[in-house]
Image (tube, rainbow, N blue to C red):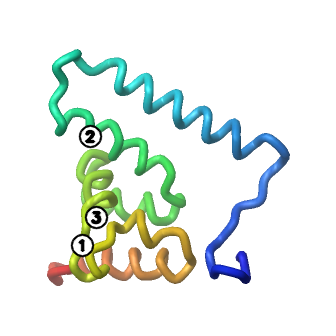
């Protein structure tokens, strides 16, 4: 954890983070290139939502997929502003351990039918 700002930092072998980021960007670009030239905003957003889902820590991604049942709905939820988060998206708050706990708690409430 970075003591200066409370956010988590991931350590990796030299070049590993860059390779992972490059791989993700290549996947996003490939997904966008597969869209027709007249793709709608919704189609483009779906590709970007899926890319966002791939960046989420595994425990959160697995739990969200359990709750929402599929990648499309999960990716959309992760990038949608939520009132209970003060108008932030779940992706916005996942940069800290506390944010991860909050997202998991919201997913539990959603699963049990509590409006969040």
x and y percentages locating residue 44 in the rendered image:
26, 34
Please name the residue that numbered disc 3 is placed on.
67
Q: Nearer the viewer, residue 20 or 112?
A: 20
- Residue 49 is left or right of residue 58, and the answer is left
| Mark 3 element type | helix
Across and down, in percent, residue 105 comes to 37, 82
Where does label 1 land, which residue?
Answer: 82
Please identify the quarter of the rendering in which residue 97 is found: bottom right
Q: Which residue corresponds to the image point at 24% horizontal and 72% vertical from the top-left? A: 82
Relative to 24, residue 68 above or below: below
Q: Are marks 1 and 3 in contact (CB under 8 Å)?
A: no
Q: Which mark sits nearer the N-terminus, 3 or 2? A: 2
x and y percentages locating residue 56 in the rendered image: 49, 57
Going 41% across and 81% down the picture, which residue do you hit?
A: 102
Q: CA distance from mark 1 to mark 3?
A: 16 Å
Looking at this view, is 68 or 52 the one in front?
52
Residue 32 coordinates in the image, percent (x, y): 35, 26
Circle 2 residue: 46
Give the structural element (helix, strand or loop) at label 1.
loop
In the image, residue 97 sits, relative to residue 79, either above or below, namely below
First in residue order: circle 1 vs circle 3: 3
**Mark 3 to mark 2 CA distance (whole Å):** 18 Å
């Amino acid at each position: 954890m970075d003591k200066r700002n409370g956010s988590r930092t991931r350590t990796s072998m030299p070049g590993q983070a860059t390779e992972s980021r490059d791989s993700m960007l290549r996947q996003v670009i490939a997904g966008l290139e597969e869209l027709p030239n007249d793709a709608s905003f919704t189609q483009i957003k779906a590709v970007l939502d899926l890319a966002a889902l791939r960046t989420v820590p595994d425990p959160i991604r697995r739990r969200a997929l359990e709750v929402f049942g599929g990648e499309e709905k999960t990716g959309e939820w992760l990038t949608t502003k939520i009132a209970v988060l003060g108008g932030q998206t779940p992706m916005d708050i996942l940069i800290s351990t506390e944010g991860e706990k909050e997202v998991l708690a919201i997913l539990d409430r959603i699963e049990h039918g509590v409006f969040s």
